[in-house]
Image (cartoon, rainbow, N blue to C red):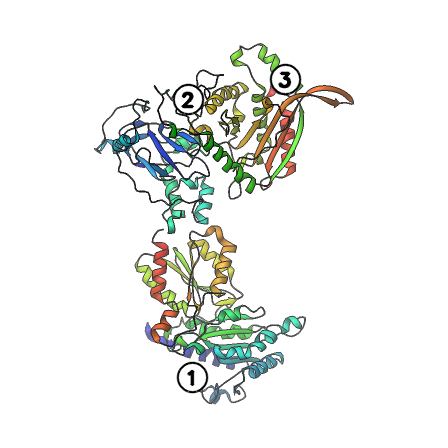
């Protein structure tokens, strides 16, 4: 059964390659994506295969090449812009927030921007405070964007195609801590739905809502909780904007308890939003207050043990859920 | 085995003091038996039981403060009792109420009680801590959430707790539910243990109901009596809540009572004094019939509108020491005028003597207040939460009245409606008052 193990990195690469093969309008640009093969070796050998017009190395100027990507998209191309890590995305934030996200609206519907931006993100590789961010909530705040979080191998493999098919700008968050992780991909899976959250594990006692690195952590925790007789439902939010409220409501209606897990710090986060939507939509389904396990409200520390302590870990999820349920 | 739990005897009741057990282990009990007396803010209440069985263990000591929902006693089935628990095999057919002579000072009483003392652990709180889901399920199933014991985080009541409570009630309380009485009484029923001439109503000799023997001698416990102050505080709490939470609207209409009074006077001529009808009986019956036509006002507002199937009119009785009691006339719409009059003759003196039983205040679905005797003409009432309407009647006075272009003098009654605007609107209220008015024009059909 363990025949077809594949790394998260390879999933991304296959997705890019498939997109380049499928549509001539697709090209990728970013820092070191060509000759160097990508800062995380995601695009290794793609330059050799597709040539410099479709795998373009750019100067170290996020505002410049993201702006160029917006222009190419307006001109009919289907650019994949790679921002090396989320840390540098703020340099391009004006282009993303004020141009990509708004042009359709500002042009009265005349100009859509079919741009895909990929960025590596996350905490957990001892890169210290300036290079360890979970800034999904920052981007999920902006109307006009679709924000995706590839917390699993299958999403890393299959999110890019529907993102490119979307007529409007899409940002895909990828997770550096997952790059070397090997998993089996369901063979029959040919695509994923980037409109909907995904129930990764069914359960009846409590729902965990999470995304990104929280997905595998929550599944690990759910496995352990199952030993204790607690059946956890794990919902991968996956689409952070616009949030798929219906899947959230359906899950809470089923389990009557909600627990939100994310690496991002707690204040003004995806978990705050999910929690609020649950209150708005299904307050009378709740048998316990919504609880959250989030990143600590600190710049992420460098030492390994402190870094681990600053984001949720499976053991904490297990213990928090046991505490929540032991009375029930 | 069932557990008998401290019932909630009012929305604001958190706990009560056990003042007297009327049963002992081994006693056989039936639905409606009074098994204990509990003192609350509003006075001493005789607690009824809604199951049948045999008392197993008494779990609460005399004078102990018992939070709502705490187990007070266990009730065994015949088989359980026979299976050799340490229970005296008493063949007593019905509970023998404790007489005053048996009542003992607190210390002795504590020793006498069979059960172990239960440590105080339930947190005192000013609202019921329950999950939204638990509250919703309780409302849907008609369970009084205040009677459910919480086991969730911080003692909160969860859905499981509510479902356990439902399961515990389901089988044995079936008969009780049919009588719509298994939910513990809402308002408190004080009972004065030391009746004084001032509190014994002069209108009626048989003050106590047959099942409550008079104490052989007064129990010397001043603390055990509901004082005018505590009743005042209870009324204050309910009325304060009402005016804080309920958006009242008021309607009034003048009713020509000449036909009703003529009919009454004609009817009463043929009756002995004891059986004579008072206008109040007509008014209450008219309200009940009008509720049949406009059922929207026969309801409570608890997490939304909860319509009530049975029409149970509560009638405000002013206490001579200050404060009010609101005894219920159950299923008022099905009672004849004579039955309503009998109920009033029975309830009013006992209400004034603070000797009502819990079921008599249990389920009123609307309140009627009549201040006719007090000499005022119009009453603008304050709704008794969680009800959604209150009907006020002033006195019947002779007033100029024009009809068909003629000016004449008629006995006029002003009826008012105070209604909860969350639950109904003016047009509904208007239909209701008009229905009352119309019924009072046909007294022979009431």
- Residue at coordinates 30% horizontally, 42% vertically from top-left? B119
Report whether residue A234 is seen: yes
Going by the image, does B84 lie left or right of A199?
left
SS class of the residue under badge 3?
Answer: helix
| Alpha-carbon span between mark 1 and mark 3 | 100 Å
> Could you say which disc has been placed on residue B261 in the image?
3
Going by the image, does A100 lie left or right of A264?
right
Q: What residue sits right under mark 2 in the picture?
A: B195
Q: What residue sits right under mark 1 in the picture?
A: A41
SS class of the residue under badge 2?
Answer: loop
Say whether mark 2 and mark 3 are on the same chain: yes
| Alpha-carbon span between mark 3 and mark 2 | 36 Å
Q: Position of residue B141 (x, y in %)?
A: 45, 41
Label 1–label 3 contact, CB within 8 A? no
Q: Residues within 10 Å of mark 2 (few under 14, many from 20)?
A: some
Q: Position of residue A16 (x, y in %)?
A: 48, 80
- Which is in the foreground here, disc 1 or disc 2? 2
Toward the viewer: B219 or A245?
A: B219
- Which is in the foreground here, disc 1 or disc 3? 3
């Amino acid at each position: 059964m363990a025949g077809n193990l594949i790394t998260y990195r390879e999933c991304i690469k296959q997705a890019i390659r498939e997109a380049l093969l499928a549509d001539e309008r697709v090209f990728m640009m970013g820092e070191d994506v060509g000759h160097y093969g990508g800062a995380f070796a995601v695009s290794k050998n793609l330059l050799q295969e597709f040539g410099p017009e479709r795998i373009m190395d750019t100067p170290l100027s996020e505002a410049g090449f993201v702006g160029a990507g917006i222009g190419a998209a307006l001109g009919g191309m289907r650019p994949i812009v790679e921002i090396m890590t989320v840390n540098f995305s703020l340099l391009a934030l004006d282009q993303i927030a004020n141009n990509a996200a708004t042009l359709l609206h500002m042009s009265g519907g005349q100009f859509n921007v079919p741009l895909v931006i990929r960025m590596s993100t996350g905490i957990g590789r001892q890169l210290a405070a300036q290079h360890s961010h979970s800034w999904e909530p920052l981007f999920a705040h902006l109307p006009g964007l679709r924000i995706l979080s590839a917390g699993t191998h299958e999403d890393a493999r299959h999110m890019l195609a529907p993102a490119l098919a979307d007529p409007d700008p899409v940002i895909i968050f990828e997770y550096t801590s997952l790059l070397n992780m090997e998993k089996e991909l369901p063979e029959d899976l040919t695509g994923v739905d980037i409109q909907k959250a995904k129930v990764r594990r069914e359960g009846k006692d409590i729902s965990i809502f999470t995304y990104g690195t929280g997905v595998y952590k929550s599944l690990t925790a759910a496995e352990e909780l199952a030993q204790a007789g607690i059946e956890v439902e794990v919902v991968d939010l996956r689409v952070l904007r616009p949030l798929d409220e219906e899947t959230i409501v359906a899950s809470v209606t089923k389990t009557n308890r909600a627990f939100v897990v994310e690496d991002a710090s707690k204040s003004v986060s995806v978990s705050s939003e999910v929690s609020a939507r649950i209150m708005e939509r299904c307050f009378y389904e709740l048998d316990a207050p919504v609880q959250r396990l989030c990143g600590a409200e600190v710049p992420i520390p460098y030492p390994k043990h402190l870094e681990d302590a600053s984001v949720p870990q499976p053991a904490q999820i297990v213990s928090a859920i046991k505490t929540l349920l032991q009375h029930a | 085995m069932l557990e008998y739990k401290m019932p909630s005897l009012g929305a604001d009741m958190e706990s009560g003091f056990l003042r007297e057990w009327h049963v002992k282990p081994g006693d056989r009990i039936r639905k409606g038996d009074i098994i204990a007396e509990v003192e609350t803010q509003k006075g001493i209440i005789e607690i009824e039981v809604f199951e049948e069985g045999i008392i197993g263990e008494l779990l609460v000591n005399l004078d102990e403060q018992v939070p709502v929902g705490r187990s007070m006693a266990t009730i065994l089935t015949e088989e359980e009792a026979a299976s050799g628990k340490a229970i005296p095999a008493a063949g007593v057919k019905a509970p023998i109420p404790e007489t005053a002579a048996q009542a003992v000072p607190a210390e002795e009483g504590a020793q006498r009680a069979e059960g172990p003392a239960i440590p105080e652990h339930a947190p005192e709180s000013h609202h019921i801590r329950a999950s939204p889901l638990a509250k919703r399920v309780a409302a849907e199933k008609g369970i009084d959430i205040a009677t459910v014991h919480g086991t969730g985080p911080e003692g909160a009541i969860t859905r499981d707790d509510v479902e356990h409570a439902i399961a515990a009630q389901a089988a044995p309380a079936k008969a009780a539910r049919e009588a719509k009485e298994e939910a513990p009484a809402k308002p408190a029923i004080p009972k004065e243990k030391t009746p004084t001439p001032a509190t014994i109503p002069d209108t009626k000799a048989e003050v106590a109901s047959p099942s409550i023997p008079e104490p052989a001698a007064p129990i010397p416990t001043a603390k055990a009596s509901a004082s005018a102050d505590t009743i005042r505080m209870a009324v204050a709490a309910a009325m304060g809540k009402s005016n804080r939470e309920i958006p009242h609207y008021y309607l009034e209409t003048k009713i020509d009572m000449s036909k009703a009074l003529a009919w009454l006077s004609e009817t009463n001529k043929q009756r002995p004094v004891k059986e004579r009808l008072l206008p109040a009986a007509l008014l209450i019956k008219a309200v009940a019939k009008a509720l049949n036509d406009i059922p929207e006002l026969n309801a409570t507002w608890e997490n939304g509108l909860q319509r009530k199937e049975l029409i149970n009119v509560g009638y405000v009785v002013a206490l001579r020491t200050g404060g009010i009691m609101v005894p219920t006339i159950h299923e008022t719409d099905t009672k004849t005028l004579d039955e309503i009059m009998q109920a009033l003759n029975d309830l009013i003196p006992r209400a004034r003597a603070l000797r009502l039983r819990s079921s008599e205040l249990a389920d009123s679905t609307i309140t009627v207040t009549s201040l006719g005797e007090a000499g005022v003409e119009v009453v603008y009432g304050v709704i008794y939460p969680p009800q959604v309407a209150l009907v006020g009647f002033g006195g019947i006075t002779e007033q100029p009245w024009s009809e068909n272009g003629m000016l004449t003098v008629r006995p006029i009654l002003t009826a008012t409606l105070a209604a909860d605007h969350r639950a109904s609107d003016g047009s509904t209220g208007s239909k209701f008052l008009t229905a009352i008015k119309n019924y009072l024009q046909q007294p022979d059909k009431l």
